[in-house]
Amino acid sequence: MTYTEIIGQGFGIIGMLCYIFSFQAKKNYLYFIFQSLGATFFALNFFLIGAYTGFAMNVVNIIRSLLLSKSDRKLWKFLLAEFLCIGSVAGSLALSPETGIHLVFTLITLAAQSFAVFVLWRANGTHIRYNQLFLLSPAWLAYDILNFTPGGIICETSCMISVIVSFVRHGKEGFEK
C-alpha cells in the first residue's frame, strides 16, 4: 500500500465518523451537514485509492446534502441532485476501467444513490433511516469491499448499527417529517 493510499484510508475513517454522527441528529439539517462532511472525506478517500466512481458519487453526495439541508422541498433541487448523481457516475464509468463484478456493484450503488435522492428530498427522517439501513448502506458496503476501503467497510456497518441505535433512542417516529 502506498502512502497516498494510506492517507486516503485515513480520510475514509474521518468520513466514517461524520456519517455515524449524522444518524444521531434529530434535525434533518444537522443530518445533512454531517452527511456532507462525511461525503467530503470519502470523496478524498476514493480519489486517493483510485476508485473514481466512488469519488464521483461522493462529490454528488456533497452537493446533494448541501442542497437538501434547507427544509424547503423544491422540485428543482431533487431534479438537480438526480441529474448530478446519474451524470457524474456515467461520466466516471466512461473514463474508468471498471468491468465485470466491479461494474455490477458500481451500478447497484448508483441505483441506491439515485433512489436515496428521492427519499432524502422527501425529508422524512424515519424513511431516510430505513433507506440507509436496508438499501444504501448494503450497496455501499459491497462497493467498499470490492474496492477495499476499510473506512468505508466499517462506516457502512457502523451506519447500519447507528440507524438501529437511533431507532432505539428516538423511536421509529421520533424524527422530522
Image: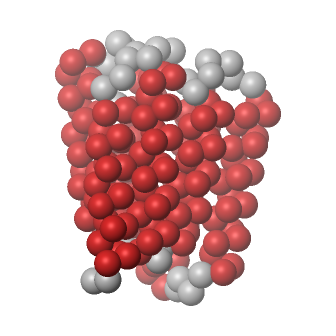
Q: Who is closer to the viewer here, 100 or 10?
A: 10
Q: Is residue 104 left or right of residue 168?
A: right
Question: Can I make out residue 105 in this image?
Answer: no
Q: Residue at x 23, y 45 (%)?
A: 158
Occupied quadrant, residue 63: top right
Specify whether 116 is left or right of 171: right
Count of picture labels: 0
What x and y, as percent, mark residue 78?
70, 36
Rendering quarter of residue 94: bottom right
Q: Is residue 150 above or below residue 24?
A: below
Tell me what residue is drawn at x 70 percent, y 70 percent. Answer: 91
User: Which residue of the protein is positioned furthest toward the front in this rendering?
Assistant: 3
Q: Position of residue 2 (x, y in %)?
A: 32, 83
- Which residue is at 51% across, 15% downward? 177
Say which of 127 and 153 sits in front: 153
Q: Residue at horizontal 49%, vertical 59%? A: 43
Q: Residue 73, percent across and down?
A: 69, 22
Q: How is the image coloured?
A: secondary structure
Where is residue 152 drawn, in percent x and y? 32, 59
If the image is split into quadrants, where does the N terminus sit?
Answer: bottom left
Q: Is residue 121 left or right of residue 169?
A: right
Whether residue 67 is visible? yes
Q: Residue furthest right?
A: 76
